[in-house]
Structures are given as C-alpha cells and as structure tokens.
Image (tube, rainbow, N blue to C red):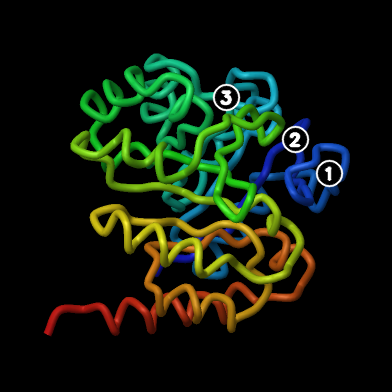
Amino acid sequence: MEIFPAIDLKNGSCVRLSQGDFDTAKVYETDPLLQAKKFAATGATRLHVVDLDGARRGDSRQFALIERIAKETPLKVQSGGGIRNAETIRKMLQAGVDRVVIGSLAVKNRKAVQDWLKEFGPDRIVLAFDVKSVDDQPEVLILGWQDGSSQLLWDALEAYEGTGLKHILCTDVDRDGMLTGPNADLYKSILDKFPAIKVLASGGVSSLGDLKALAEIPVEGAIVGKALYEGRLDLAEALKIQSKSDENNEPT
C-alpha cells in the first residue's frame, strides 16, 4: 500500500475542506511547492494534488503550479480537478504528472473517458468517484462534490468493465476532512465486486491504525491530508507502514 500525502489547491494555497464544503476551506500552507518538497524530504514518493478551483469551475485553473511541483520535486504526482478534455490530459502528462485523475466526466461522459483510457493507457489515468451514502448506498457526486449524479457507484464501475480500467480513487465525502476513520467496508465491497480494480482510499484517515486497517484490506494506496497538516499523523511513521506493507506483498 502506498501513502499519498495530499495537497488541495485553492487560490494558490494548500487548503483542506470538511465534507467537500468550499466554505470550510482552511489554509495550511501558502507555498504548495514548499509543502511538496517537505513531503519528499520526509521520504514520500507519491503526491496527490487536487485543483479545487478547477474542480468547482470545470476547467484546469492551476496548471503552472502543478507543473512546478511535478518538475521541481522527485515525487510521482497524480493530479486532477477540472480535467475535461484529452488536450489537458496530454498537457499534464507532458508537464511531468505521473497520473491524471478524472472525476465528473467518468460519470457524465463515459465514452470520452473510455477513449482516454485507450489513448493514454490505464496506468496513466485514475477515475475518481466521490460518494455519499444515500439510503445506505454510495451515490456518486460530481462537480467538486456540489451535485448528485443519481447514480450508484456500482453502476458507474460496471460501465467500465472491459475497458481496461485499472485505478480508481474513491472518497467517502461524509468522512473527508472529518478525521473519523476511513470507510473500510466500502473499499472491501468495491474489491469484492470488482477484484481487477486497484483502489485508492480517501477520506477520514486520522491515525496509524486507520492506515494499518486499509493495508489489510488491501487497498493500493491511501490519501492522507488533514491528519498530516494538523499533526495527528506523522508522515515518517506512516511511510513505515507503507514499507512493511510492500514487504509483505513481495513475491516469495
């Protein structure tokens, strides 16, 4: 299991939201590049970057900053927020981004996203499904978590069977930024129903115990944000769990 420290960009600063509410944005660092370098210096190899302004408005807004992070740090950056066309994906990859995250369009325009999986390859594309429990079922939200899609996660994933989809990022919006622990049951259900898919877990991670629980499922990776910024979780200790998890999964 890989640890992905998170940088959420809003107006050029690192912020964190609570349950996807833009009005709750709290600034933790005004220099995102510096923050990325700090993560790298601690030993992180991956970074999750979200352009919140882009996600809200429907187009990439902070490309120059994301490009600097990708090119001026050794981190493998996965980034999304407002990605709406192949040209933007190509531009991000050329800028040094390792994987591009596609959110709303994974539900709103499946044909285009299926074409992108073919064009860029399943290792370079991550589909992000932000879900909220409705009648005990995970409904997918779109447009920066502002709107419901009236579509369950299971239906959204079934639509990509046979397309080569490999990586998904699933965020439980009810837990995001709340430090209440990840929705392990949700991730177990995804892997039970779609065993060929690799899951990145997001939302609620607050402790080493949470990461250990995710590693046991096992998910491919865990996104960690607010717990790091508020000092509840030490990144160096979290990376030890990553190393131990990697050792346990080595072929014998």
Query: What is the crowding at mark 3: few (fewer than 14 residues within 10 Å), some, or many (at least 20)?
Result: many
Residue 236 percent location from the top left of the image? 57, 77
Q: From the viewer's perspective, tell me whether residue 36 is left or right of residue 152.
A: right
For badge 1, the amino acid type reads Ala
Q: Give the numbered dot on residue 82.
A: 3
The number of numbered badges drawn on the structure is 3
The residue depicted at 68 percent of the width and 19 percent of the height is 57
Q: Earlier in the sequence, mark 3 or mark 2?
A: 2
Q: Residue furthest left?
A: 252
Q: Position of residue 59 (x, y in %)?
A: 59, 18
The first of marks 1 and 2 along the sequence is 2
- The residue carrying mark 1 is 25
Element type at marker 2? strand
When the figure is inspected, residue 14 is found, relative to residue 105, above or below; the finding is below
| Cα–Cα gap, marks 1 and 2 | 8 Å
Residue type marked 3: Gly
Is 83 rendered above or below residue 178?
A: above
In depth, the one of 183 and 91 nearer the eye is 183
Q: Residue at x 67, y 44 (%)?
A: 8
Rendered-image quadrant of the C terminus? bottom left
Dot label at residue 126: none
Q: Secondary structure at mark 3?
A: loop
Q: CA distance from mark 3 to mark 2?
A: 13 Å
Compared across the picture, whether 185 is left or right of 99 comes to right
Q: Which of disc 3 and disc 1 is earlier in sequence?
A: 1
Q: Position of residue 192 (x, y in %)?
A: 32, 63
- 102 displayed left or right of 123: right
Residue 12 in the image: state x and y as whole percent: 74, 34
Horizontal side, residue 67 vs residue 7: left or right: left
For the residues bearing labels 1 and 3, Cβ distance under 8 angstroms:
no
Q: Which residue is mark 2?
A: 10
